[in-house]
Every structure is written in structure tokens, then in C-alpha cells.
Amino acid sequence: MNTPSIYGLTLDQLEAWLLEQGQKKFRAQQIWDWLYIKRVLDFSEMTNLSKDLVALLSDTFLLQPLNQVVVQESADGTTKYLFQLEDKLMIETVLMRQEYGLSVCVTTQVGCDIGCTFCASGLKRKQRDLTAGEIVAQIMQIQHYLDQKGNGERVSHIVVMGIGEPFDNYDNVIAFLNIVNHAKGLAIGARHITVSTSGLAPKIREFAENGLQVNLALSLHAPNDEIRSRMMRINRKHPLKEVMAAIDEYLEKTNRRITFEYIMISGVNDRPEQAHELVALLKDKRHLSYVNLIPYNPVAEHIKYERSTKKDILAFYDILKKNNINCVIRKEHGTDIDAACGQLRSKHLEKATK
């Protein structure tokens, strides 16, 4: 990385930087107003700053660190973006239209090392972490896209569930959360933000101490170690007993409900006996548990996996409900485009190497 993105600075960090440059501290709030309220696309549009300060900002920071390469829009309004970073690496971001508002799914790493055998994101190993500025820029790029449409729409929700393991890039993700949540910036409510982890138990504990009111989701996908270790390599390092102990600690400290993500794969994790195992696993925490059953998006490179049938998904759902486990079958988005996380990037990279 050469030039940092200005979106990576918290308000306090921007104030400190301005003071170091011999500028007035209050300029930070003016700059943030231009960035997040007026949402300008060039430093030269910050008309209440001196020409010298505008030049200094332009020389020091990138305002648009992402270059839009591909946009795919689904019939249901889901929009998938392929962005190129300053160093020419590629990431994906997704805009989803929900009943409750506009939700953006952000990426936190270029590639992923967690090793989930069903996932397109892990087809390409991690090349680097994204900076906080590059993660914030994904939200801003999509907000600019909405602004240009002129319908007055705003990003209202964020899910940190794109390419990469957020807790493997912990410090940058926490900085991102603080920036987008700040009342003087985008002011996206903490309870409208969800961070997903594959189960890095020490980071779950650290997150519990953080004090952010952000929601947590665990990519569970299996009710026992035998199946989960086959599906997710990370389970060999942090097995279910360790992960669930960290979840218990998180629940005790925060008293916040946690979502358990569960991708439904035919013949792998969707049998009635596995539903009963899941009930047993969550029984002592069901008052703060919410299971999200996700129909699997097939990936060409993982032909051994198929989506569970509607009948099997409903049978699984019924067992959970009858045992007082809060659950829902997730509504699908973008099924007519490269819907699975990482698919668009993988396809683009394959074409580029041919």
C-alpha cells in the first residue's frame, strides 16, 4: 500500500494529524462533514478549507481508493460490485435490498485462509488484510452509487460477511466499525451492524470486552466436530467446545443475542439427527440464540456439495422450532448473478489468467 485512504482515520486520528500539520483541530469536523454528510468525490470540493489544506489532503490521502471493475444487478435489486484496489488486487462488495432497508456486505481481506470447503472465498488464499480505509470505502462507494441515482436512498445496515475472516483482521475491522458508527459521520447504528466469524475463539472473547453494541454471528454450519472439521479447517484449531465456551463468555458479558449461520448442504449437515444435535448444542443458550438456515449456493469448484432440498430444509427447521430454538430460513438474494461470496472475483481472476 502506498497512499492511505482518508476514510481509514477516526475523527480523533484526523484531529491529531491536523494538529501535527499545524492546522486547527476543528477542521477535522469540517472534513468529516464533506466526507460523510455531503459525500464529495474530490478534495477540491471542500470549499470551506484553504487551498493549502486541500493540497495537503490531496498529497497525503486517497479519497477514492477503489476502482469499480464490474457491477452485476440482480432482478431482485441485489447488486454485486467487483472493486480493484490501489495495488490492483480485487475484492467484492454486495448491496442487498431488505424489507428493513439497504444492507451492504463488506469484504475484510483479499482472499481467505480459513479453509471452508464449501466456500468460493477460500479458493484464493489470503494475499493481505484490507485497511480500515479500504473497508469504509466499500460503504462509501455504494453510497455514492445510490447518491448518483438520485432517489435519496441511504445504506442503513452493514454485514461484515464478505471475503475473509473479520477477526483475522481484527484491529482494522474494529476501526472500521467505530468510523461507520460515529454519530458525526455515517451514523449507522451499532445494532444495524453484524460481524461474522468462523470461530476464532480468542477474538470472540476480545470482542466481548470491546463495548461496541454491534451484533455477532458465528458461522457454525455443523453441530459436531467431525462434520465441522470436514467443512471448516479452522475447527481443527478451535474446536466446538472452545468456540462455544467463548460464545458463552460473550453472552454473559454482553447479554446480546447471537446469530448462528448454518449453510444447508445435502447429505452433509441437513439430516434430522443433526438438527437434534444442534438443538442439544444450543439448548442452554436458546434465549439468546437465533439460527439462520441458509440454502447453499453451489460453487463450480466444489461439485461434491449440493443444496439441501426444500423438504429437508423445512424438516430441519421444524425440529428446531419444536424444540424452542429461534430460527429462520434465509431469504435468498441475487440468485441470478454470481451469488456465492467470492464467485465474481474468482471468475474474473480466471478470465484474466487465460
Image: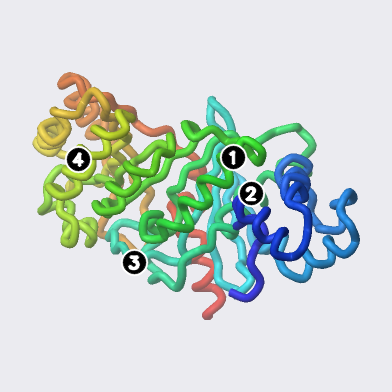
Q: What is the three-letter code of the residue carrying label 3?
A: Asp
* CB atoms of marks 3 and 1 within 8 Å: no
Task: Give the foreground label among 1 and 4.
Answer: 1
**Nearest to N terminus: mark 3 or mark 1:** 3
Classify 2 as above or below 221.
below
**Nearest to N terminus: mark 3 or mark 2:** 2
Q: Position of residue 289 (x, y in %)?
A: 26, 29
Give the crowd class for mark 4: few <14, some 14-19, many >=20 residues within 10 Å.
many
**Nearest to N terminus: mark 4 or mark 2:** 2
Classify 83 as above or below 96.
below
Task: Give the foreground label among 4 and 2.
Answer: 2
Q: Secondary structure at mark 3?
A: loop
Classify 20 as above or below 141.
below
Q: Position of residue 214 (x, y in %)?
A: 43, 37
**Nearest to N terminus: mark 1 or mark 2:** 2
Q: Which residue is mark 4?
A: 270
- The dot on residue 113 is 3
Q: Which residue is mark 2?
A: 11
Q: Which residue is mark 1?
A: 182
Q: What is the three-letter code of the residue carrying label 4?
A: Asp
Give the crowd class for mark 2: few <14, some 14-19, many >=20 residues within 10 Å.
some
Answer left or right for 80 relative to 113.
right
Q: Secondary structure at mark 1?
A: loop
**Whether residue 158 can be seen here:** yes
221, 63: nearer the viewer: 63
* CB atoms of marks 1 and 2 within 8 Å: yes
Task: Give the foreground label among 3 and 4.
Answer: 3
Residue in the picture at 51% in, 63% down: 130
Q: Secondary structure at mark 2?
A: helix
For the residues marked 3 and 2, what is the alpha-carbon distance in whole angstroms?
Answer: 32 Å
